[in-house]
Image (cartoon, helix red, strand yellow):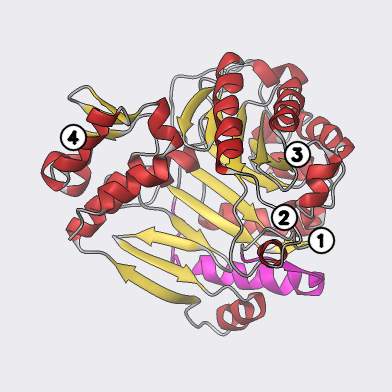
């Protein structure tokens, strides 16, 4: 089998539909267009069919938008098409779980929240707390979904209002309860640095999240993406962003609190209990190949990166007409691709592993950016044990600057 940086072993499928478009979100989403869902599923099936034959993968990730905004019958259509063209293949990592029968659609006991999960493959679906019902969770499990990523963002009403979220804190408990009756792994997405937020409030969010015993937590500093309603509010002075010092304090507190709770910090924004890293994340941050389908989705196959159109109606029209749905294509030269690989891999706890990097790119990382590695070591940004270069705690706090330093040498 070709190596994973040549032939994809993971795939992403995008579902753009939401009940409400949150003010900070710049993803390819659409609200108030539920009448397009069935046409979109038909268009998505058409794009998947361009594979020509089923392509087995080790992990699947269906994101959005809000995949669980779909009705149970629409979820069945979506999952049926995805599983037809992207069947999951077993990958034995030597992990074990007692009594797991989610792939068969059976219930999973709630004590799996702290058990080691033997996922032979990973099938993740994103959900909003107010859209995940037990009926939908049962549909997910019947198609082999074994990981649900819940967009909690915050447990505090003031922070949810600042983020323009429409769910209430009490929806989280119901969503977790529904998920755990059928799906063994639960992940939470949390956002820190919302307007008006404090370190105490962020600490309370982490406390509330850990009380549910998720196996995985992603923490993201709020980004004011240009053109979003929140960005516009910031520019007219209607909101005030958290200071850099406050955001740093929140990030460092997340590192400390989640580590104390038994999580490993395996990527800048991602924390997992042992055995529960998100494989989709790992493939992405290793800069390996991946499939991507749906409006706004990206794919990276054979060294070529393509991006689909971001307009849902345009995507549907093109896909149903048999026209290409990608509007952007990029193929980096080998040296540029090697620098990109260094930049993504530096974000991981595993860092840049020299032997693997040479095999993947054909380049020696020390010859590409020796001055950057020297600077990292001298300033305490990274630790170099000879076999790999990994960010230190300080380095994780300035990861964007470290990546920018690396890329300066891509001339």
Q: Which mark is residue 154?
A: 3
Q: How many marks?
A: 4
30 w.r.t. 71: above or below: below
45 w.r.t. 171: above or below: below
Q: Quadrant of residue 141?
A: top right
Is residue 54 in the magenta section? yes
**Secondary element at image label 2:** loop
- Measured from the top left, where is residue 163 in percent x and y? 75, 51
Name the residue that disc number 4 marks. Answer: 374
Residues in magenta?
28-55
Q: Is the C-beta separation of discs 3 and 4 under 8 Å?
A: no
Q: Is the C-beta separation of discs 2 and 1 under 8 Å?
A: yes
N-terminal-most mark, 2 or 1 = 1
Side of 341 relative to 349 (left or right): left
Name the residue that disc number 2 marks. Answer: 66
Is residue 184 in the magenta section? no
Q: Is the C-beta separation of discs 2 and 4 under 8 Å?
A: no
**Secondary element at image label 3:** loop
N-terminal-most mark, 4 or 1 = 1
């Amino acid at each position: 089998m070709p190596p994973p940086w040549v032939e994809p072993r993971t795939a992403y499928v995008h579902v753009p539909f939401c009940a409400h478009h949150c003010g900070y979100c710049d993803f390819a989403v659409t609200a108030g267009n539920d009448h397009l869902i069935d046409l979109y599923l038909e268009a998505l099936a058409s794009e998947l069919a361009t594979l020509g034959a089923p392509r087995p993968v080790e992990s699947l990730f269906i994101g959005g938008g809000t995949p669980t905004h779909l009705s149970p019958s629409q979820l069945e259509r979506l999952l049926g098409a995805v599983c037809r063209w992207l069947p999951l293949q077993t990958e034995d990592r030597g992990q074990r779980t007692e009594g797991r029968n989610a792939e068969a659609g059976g219930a999973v006991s709630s004590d799996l929240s702290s058990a080691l999960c033997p996922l032979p493959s990973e099938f993740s679906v994103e959900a909003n707390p107010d859209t995940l019902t037990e009926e939908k969770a049962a549909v997910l499990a019947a198609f082999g979904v074994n990981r649900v990523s819940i967009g909690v963002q915050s447990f505090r009403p003031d922070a949810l209002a600042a983020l323009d979220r429409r769910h209430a804190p009490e929806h989280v408990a119901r969503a977790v309860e529904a998920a755990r009756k059928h799906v063994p792994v639960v992940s939470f997405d949390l956002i820190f640095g919302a307007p008006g937020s404090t370190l105490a409030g962020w600490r309370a969010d982490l406390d509330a999240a850990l009380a549910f015993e998720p196996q995985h937590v992603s923490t993201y500093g709020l980004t004011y993406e240009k053109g979003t309603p929140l960005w516009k509010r910031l520019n007219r002075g209607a909101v005030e962003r958290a200071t850099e010092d406050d955001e740093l304090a929140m990030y460092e507190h997340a590192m400390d609190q989640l580590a104390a709770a038994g999580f490993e910090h395996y990527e800048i924004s991602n924390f997992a209990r042992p055995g529960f890293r998100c494989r989709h994340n790992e493939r992405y941050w290793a800069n390996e190949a991946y499939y991507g389908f749906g409006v706004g989705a990206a794919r990276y196959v054979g060294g070529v990166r393509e991006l689909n159109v971001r307009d849902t109606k345009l995507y549907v029209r093109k896909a149903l007409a048999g026209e290409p749905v990608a509007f952007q294509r990029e193929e980096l030269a080998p040296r540029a691709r090697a620098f990109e690989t260094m930049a993504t891999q530096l974000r991981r706890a595993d860092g840049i592993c020299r032997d693997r990097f040479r095999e993947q790119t054909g380049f020696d990382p020390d010859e590409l950016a020796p001055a950057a590695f020297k600077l990292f070591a001298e300033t305490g940004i990274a630790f170099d044990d000879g076999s790999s270069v990994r960010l230190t705690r300080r380095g994780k706090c300035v990861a964007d600057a470290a990546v920018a330093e690396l890329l300066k040498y891509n001339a």
